[in-house]
Image: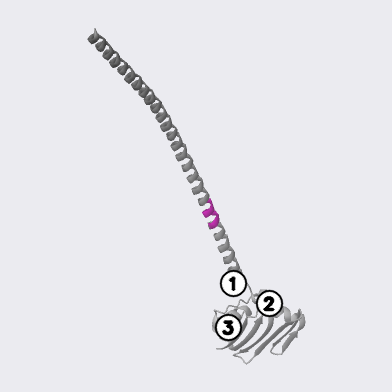
Amino acid sequence: MQWKKMTTLGLAVFLSACGTADDQNGGDGGNGDMNGNGNGDAMEENGDMNGNGEANGNAGNGDMTEDLSNDMVTDDANMENEMDDMNGENGGGDDETALDKGVRELEMEIQFTDDTEWEFEYETENDEVDAEVEKDDDASEGNEAREEIEEILENLQLDNQQGDEGLAQELISALDLNEDDIYKLEFYIELENVEMYNVEQAY
């Protein structure tokens, strides 16, 4: 009898241990499910976050690229406008005549091969112009002389890069003269912008 009791007790202990193990396994299984579900949800969440993050990141990068592109286009346009303005100013400067620049003083003497001579004088002071023209035995002054000289100045473009010969040619062209008829040309002019030209050319 004692042996049977011992056997029964051992069997009970064994069954109890198995039941506990099953419960634990079941619990672990539950944890496994929970962990599985949790990890799955977390992975899904991470996937969503990564997807959204990537999309947002790409969208952000796209916006930044577009902004940079627009800025570059704007900068290029501004630079082009500035260059156009500069070129326009330079072009305007090239097209400016001596009269446009304003003349403070002018003295010119032309000796021709036939021994005749022309003289021109023009001076501005206090917004008043004093002008005089002498051609052989013909002389004029005041408004008549002023208009004649200013008509020449309207056709005269001066440039420091021209040199004496180039300036003399420009002056001969403005006077509508033939170089072959000229023996000697002397020319002095001072502009309002403080530019001065002094030319002496013999032919």
Q: Secondary structure at mark 3?
A: helix
- Foreground: 167 or 91? 91
Query: Is residue 16 toward the left or the right of residue 52 in the image?
Result: left
Q: What residue span does the magenta drawing correspond to?
A: 70-75
Q: Residue at the far front: name it.
A: 2
Q: What is the number of the mark on residue 46?
A: none
Q: CA distance from mark 1 to mark 3?
A: 17 Å
Q: Residues within 10 Å of mark 1 (few under 14, many from 20)?
A: few
Asked whether residue 61 is drawn in magenta, I would say no
| Disc with the residue nearer the chain's start (1 vs 3) | 1
Circle 3 residues within 10 Å: few <14, some 14–19, many ≥20: many
Residue occupying the point 54% across, 82% down = 163
Q: Nearer the viewer, mark 1 or mark 3?
A: 1
Q: Amino acid at mark 1?
A: Asp
Question: Which x, y percent locates residue 93?
Answer: 61, 71
Q: The residue under label 2 is which amino acid type?
A: Gly
Q: Secondary structure at mark 2?
A: loop
Q: Nearer the viewer, residue 179 or 10?
A: 10
Residue picked out by circle 1: 94
Q: Secondary structure at mark 1?
A: helix
Taking the image as shown, residue 116 lies to the left or right of residue 6, namely right
Mark 1 or mark 2: whose residue is earlier in sequence: 1
Label at residue 168: 3
Amino acid beneath label 3: Ala
**Picture disc at residue 102:** 2
